[in-house]
Amino acid sequence: MSESAVKILVVEDEAKIAEALSAYLGSAGYGVSLADDGESGLAAFNKSAPDLVILDLMLPKMSGEKLCTEIRRVSRVPVIMLTAKSGEDDKVCGFALGADDYISKPFSPRELMARVRSVLRRSAGGVSPLFSRMSWNSGDLEIDLESRSVWKGGEPAALTPNEYKILARLVKHPNRAFSRDELIDTALGENFGGFERTVDSHVKNLRGKIEDDTANPVYIVTVRGVGYRFGGAARAETER
Ligand code: CA
């Protein structure tokens, strides 16, 4: 994973700290987007599908704790909590909400970058290894994001690299609808020389490999006027 491809969402209401974070992370080559309250943070999360979220605890409109919980409803994206509180109780609370790491204010740029790199390394491209293996509909579909393996009905499914990338991107953000453009950019890479219809053709082949009935897909669902999302009638059973 090249650092330039990594998108980081920073939700912080103190302008000085937000600017400092943006400068540190930007100069390290990360793509940074900023939000200054919890609600716009959630909107930015849904819009930009970041690879890492850095979250202040004390935020206007929606607290960092609440925002972390909202993000964890739909995503395993790594979350680093930024806080002036440094008591052990707060850490335990943050980890229970699903935060991956903590940085106490004031922090040094060196500490910040070390935490960011470490969390991204552990997440292996967006998903914590703890949740790397997932299955749906009584084991009908299984995906191991660490080994990049997919099984359909217990048998290995032979996905092409592009089919796998599209599926993994959708799985990492269940319930979020992706446009064809976004799937080209985020899954296949901005330099991918394909057209929007190329995504449709990958999805068609992918459905042939993982759906029982390609006319009524339960995993890769078409969202009219938008694109595709993962979900539909898929029930997640195991996450470990
Ligand atoms: Ca704050």
Image (cartoon, rainbow, N blue to C red):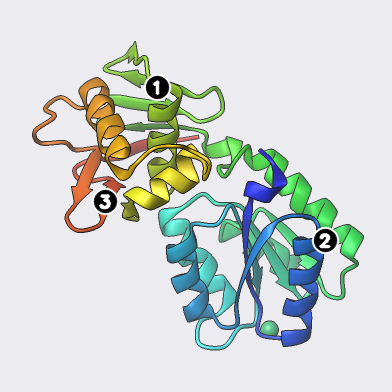
Identify the residue under disc 2.
112
- Is residue 222 visible in the rendered image? The answer is yes
Q: Locate residue 137: give its quadrant.
A: top left
The Cα–Cα distance between marks 2 and 1, rounded to whole angstroms, is: 35 Å
Left or right side of 149 for 77: right
**Foreground of the two, 187 or 66:** 187
Q: Locate residue 139: give its quadrant.
A: top left
Q: Residues within 10 Å of mark 2 (few under 14, many from 20)?
A: some
Left or right side of 192 for 167: left
N-terminal-most mark, 2 or 1 = 2
N-terminal-most mark, 3 or 1 = 1
Disc 2, SS:
helix
**Foreground of the two, 12 or 189:** 189
Identify the residue under disc 3.
227
- Is residue 238 visible in the rendered image? The answer is no
Left or right side of 107 for 18: left
Q: Is residue 149 above or below residue 59?
A: above
| Image spot of residue 203 (x, y percent) | 27, 33
Identify the residue under disc 1.
150
Q: Residues within 10 Å of mark 3 (few under 14, many from 20)?
A: some
Q: Is residue 44 above or below residue 3?
A: below
**Residue at the far top in the pictured view:** 155
Do the CB atoms of the residues marked 2 and 1 lie less than 8 Å apart? no
Q: Quadrant of ligand 1?
A: bottom right
Q: Residue at x 34, y 16 (%)?
A: 157
Q: Is residue 145 above or below residue 196?
A: above
Q: Residues within 10 Å of mark 1 (few under 14, many from 20)?
A: many
Q: Residue at x 53, y 79 (%)?
A: 38
Residue type (three-letter) at the residue carrying disc 1? Val
